[in-house]
Amino acid sequence: EFASLCLLLLGASVAMAQDGGTTADGATPAEQAAPAGAAPAADTGADPSAAPSGSTPASDTTAPSVSGTTGASAQDTGAQGSDGGSADAAANADAGSGDATASKGFFADRAWYAGADYVATTFTSSSSPGFAPGHYDSGMYRLRGGTRFFGFLGAELQYGLDAGGSDLSTENYMGVFAVPTTTVLETFELAFPVGYTMSKVSGGGSATLQGLGYGVAAELPLRTFGQSMPDLRFTAGWTVYYRGSDAQLYGGNVGLRYDFGGPREEPPAPAQ
């Protein structure tokens, strides 16, 4: 019995020695030696397919982020392009509007005038064909119209018709002039037309006279006597229509001129 008991105790000791490598719950000694609460070491040999269902690889989450950023940038660029196109279209529309306004302003803001006068002309012949040397008196009605480009310079067209005369008739007359002007004592205006003229006269013979024409004129506005007066001017002047070695044509004129267009001065308000 004693021998049987010894054998039983020996077998139990061997069994306990074999079971000492594991714990009761199956933990290894290394796991038992790890501090409480520490995360277990990663298993480098883990199978990627073993990842939990529904998880996304890091590369998959980065790519959409980059794509989204690119899309936002494209949208911003498109918006900027749209804004730039709108700004360019608005600028072009403004430029076109400015050109149309400037074109209209050229005529709307320009001062124009028209006039009519009587010219007593004298034709002097020295060697003009068909005319004996001497002086020949005549007359014509002259129409003129013009505009002021600057405060001191304008342009004027003139046309004349025969008004009858004792010695000579002026069949027709045309002229184009540049007209520098100045104002004297803020009362009347002096003009100095210089340009090209062509006149055809007839009497004992016929002659066409063309060349440089020049003169001087004084104009007195009726508004000098009151701003409520019409914009008319009394005019008087002297013009050389042709001057050559064979003949001369010149004369004095009196008439009226009417101004229109451009800015107009209003009469001063009555005192309260």
Image (cartoon, rainbow, N blue to C red):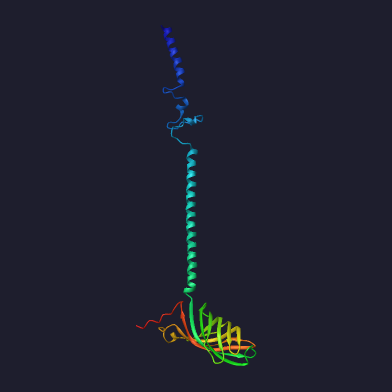
Relative to 51, does residue 251 appear above or below in the rendering? below
Relative to 180, does residue 90 appear above or below in the rendering? above
Point out the image quarter for the C terminus: bottom left
In the image shown, does 4 or 211 lie closer to the viewer? Answer: 211
Relative to 266, does residue 254 appear above or below in the rendering? below
**Residue sitting farthest toward the left:** 272
Q: Is residue 153 visible?
A: no
Q: Is residue 19 left or right of residue 172?
A: left
**Residue sitting farthest toward the front:** 204
In the image shown, does 129 or 251 lie closer to the viewer? Answer: 129
In the image shown, does 8 or 141 lie closer to the viewer? Answer: 141
Q: What residue lies at 49% left-to-right and 83% top-to-bottom?
A: 115
Q: What residue lies at 44% left-to-right and 17% top-to-bottom?
A: 16
Point out the image quarter for the N terminus: top left
In the image shown, does 163 or 8 lie closer to the viewer? Answer: 163
x, y percent for residue 268: 40, 82
Relative to 57, does residue 242 appear above or below in the rendering? below
x, y percent for residue 259: 46, 81
Name the quadrant containing residue 127. Answer: bottom right
x, y percent for residue 235: 49, 87
x, y percent for residue 27: 44, 25
